[in-house]
Amino acid sequence: MKVGLIGDSLTEGRPGVSFYNLLKLQYPHISFDNLGNPGETIKSLLTRLEKVPLQSSYDLLILWIGVNDVYSKLLKVQAQPVAKDHIEFEEYCLKVLEKAHAASKNVVLVSPALVGEDLQNHSNQEIKELTSIMESVALKSGNIYFVNMQNLFKEHLENLECSSFINKNVMRVLLDVLFYKNPLRIDKLSQKRGLHVTLDGVHLNSKGANIVAQQYSSIIELYGDEGDKIGRF
């Protein structure tokens, strides 16, 4: 079985704890392709897939994208272009799913999770809006399995006292990549910042990586049970 994981730095696994590494340990018999690209937005992802088309041999493709369409607005440096509005975001999302479906009949679209652990902040309200768009796009595309990742994280955070910390300094993000590679050190820094599931408000600590890995595992198990029916609502 071959599984493609498409996304941004959350999929790549840096900075923070990698859910991809957890999946590899859990499923040593599965071939995983990590197609995460730091800073990726829905617009830059489409450009990437147009330049370098996906292989057409994936049994399952899981696409987690969208957080940088919100998070990058808080940074002084934008690594990748973003959609100018929600209409354009929807158009790019549809085109990305077309590219994905050309590579696999089993495609899973995952909405962004968090920009900050305060679920009521402006960025997370925008993520909620993008989630609604992505769910609608999945329905329009047909045979797309949709996962609301924000709701999943909400279940773990809604009864906790959450810090408003968000790392908005690009240099600090890079330093976290360089100096915080060990999960124990990552979790210690996360705790120091008053965070529960992320290192910096966006990237994952051990608990956050486990949440994502468990969700992806459920998808993989569903594929194992239902085969080519996974994308059907």
Image (tube, rainbow, N blue to C red):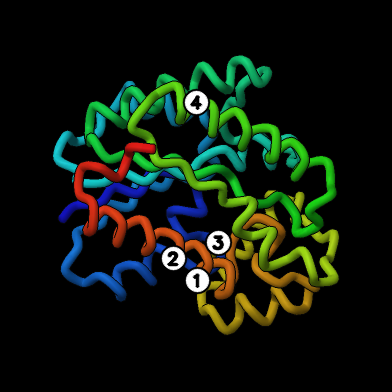
The C terminus sits in image quarter: top left
| Dots 1, 4 in contact, CB < 8 A | no
Lower sequence index among marks 1 and 4: 4
Q: Position of residue 165 (x, y in %)?
A: 81, 60
Secondary structure state at the residue bearing disc 2: helix
| Residue ID for mark 1 | 210
Lower sequence index among marks 3 and 1: 3
- Cα–Cα gap, marks 1 and 4: 27 Å
| Residue ID for mark 4 | 137
Lower sequence index among marks 3 and 2: 3
- Label disc, if present, on residue 15 of the rendered structure: 3
- Please state which of residues 58 and 77 is positioned toward the viewer in this rendering: 58
Q: Position of residue 169 (x, y in %)?
A: 75, 51
Secondary structure state at the residue bearing disc 3: loop
- Cα–Cα gap, marks 3 and 1: 15 Å
Q: Quadrant of residue 232?
A: top left
Secondary structure state at the residue bearing disc 1: helix
The amino acid pointed to by label 1 is Asn
Label 2: how many Cα within 10 Å (few below 14, some 14–19, many 20+): many
Question: Position of 47 compared to 55: left or right?
Answer: right
The amino acid pointed to by label 4 is Val
Q: Quadrant of residue 20?
A: bottom left
- Please state which of residues 135 and 207 is positioned toward the viewer in this rendering: 135
- Cα–Cα gap, marks 4 and 3: 29 Å
